[in-house]
Image (tube, grey):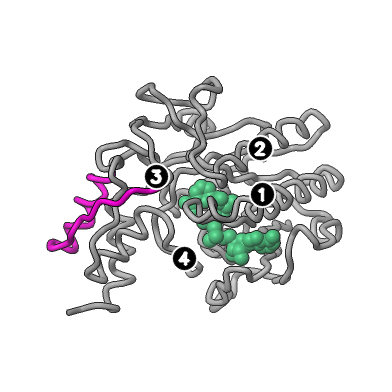
Amino acid sequence: MKIVVTGALGHIGSRLVRHLPDHFPGAEIVLVDDMSTQRYPALFDLPASGRYRFIEGDVTRLDLAPLLAGAAAVVQLAAITDATRSFDRKDEVEQNNFHATRQIAEACLKAGVPLIHPSSTSVYGTQNEVVDEECGPDELAPQSPYAECKLKEEALLAEMGKSGLRFITCRFGTIFGTSPGMRFHTAVNKFCWQAVMGLPLTVWTTAYDQKRPYLDLGDCVRAVAHIIGTGLFDGRIHNVLTANCTVRQIVDAIRVHVPDLEVGFVDARIMNQLSYEVANQRFRSSGFEFQGSVAAGIEDTIRLLRGANRS
Ligand SMILES: NC(=O)c1ccc[n+]([C@@H]2O[C@H](COP(=O)([O-])OP(=O)(O)OC[C@H]3O[C@@H](n4cnc5c(N)ncnc54)[C@H](O)[C@@H]3O)[C@@H](O)[C@H]2O)c1
């Protein structure tokens, strides 16, 4: 069995590629990354149980056919992922992210290989209390060029599905939890960093009591293995998230470890007045159980960082 992971050195990929050999013993795991984010440590100490092959390259330029030949699945994680900064890099995000997904989807279609496409719950923005995958267009309100691009990729794949592409789109919640290729742009990780470093937590003014969906990184990589193992390439969108919670709940969970943390409020371009929960029933009904928790993820993250500032 061969599994191709593009963007493999990133936050999700670096944890995923360590998990796959446990789930699929003996599988060949092809890692592709263009090193644009310099996550070299993601390649350190890969488990001896894995049959890895790393290819350095930009997926929008690589000849993908030989890489995909005979693969059981492609997990397409290659993307520019800093949503807040995507306002200043709209063209670059579109150029990289949309084209990466399109090139890979076209290569998958040609090779008959199924594709796992990570979208994001940041495409939602609803007045309702709960939103699911069947929501109308009025409940989709991407707040950044990054999220707009995700919707465009989703539409592209839905169209290609009609020509025979086998795929699943996963709208991942905001990831929390640790990995060798970890990044700190996103809420929970960033707040843990700030708390340990003695900095005020930069909470968006409107966000404190708004509910949003979060995904434990352990759940995320198990979800990917579940999809490959069960062949859940149903051409549909699935919300994949561990829990919906408010920033206040996240801050309270961090305060357990850093009692004197300070909260500072800031304005950001990605803000709205909406509070909503995202339903994960569709993915759970495929037989998947979410096991992570925000409290445990925060504890792990703080443990990882703690040594950097013990004063
Ligand atoms: N982390 C989250 O909270 C989250 C939530 C929802 C969706 N997602 C999606 O999951 C995917 C992976 O996210 P992540 O958190 O691991 O991101 P990341 O930024 O940590 O990793 C992305 C990796 O892709 C590589 N890359 C970028 N462009 C490339 C290209 N053209 N060719 C080859 N490699 C390239 C980068 O070097 C990096 O290692 C992304 O599509 C992201 O939008 C992430």
Q: Is residue 311 above or below residue 105?
A: below
- In three-dimensional space, the C-alpha distance between marks 4 and 2, rounded to whole angstroms, equals 26 Å
Image location (x, y in percent) of residue 295: 27, 52
Q: Which amino acid does label 4 sit on?
A: Met
| Residue 70 is one of the magenta-drawn residues | no
- Secondary structure of the residue carrying tag 2 is helix
For this rendering, which residue is in front, 122 or 53?
122
Rendering quarter of residue 245: top left
The mark closer to the camera, 2 or 3, is 2
The mark closer to the camera, 3 or 1, is 1
- Secondary structure of the residue carrying tag 1 is helix
Asked if the residue at label 4 sits under 8 Å from ligand 1, the reply is: yes
* Residue 152 - label: 2
Asked if disc 2 and disc 1 are in contact, CB closer than 8 Å, the reply is yes
Residues in magenta, as a range: 247-268
How dense is the environment of label 3, judged by Cα within 10 Å: few (below 14), some, or many (20 and up)?
many
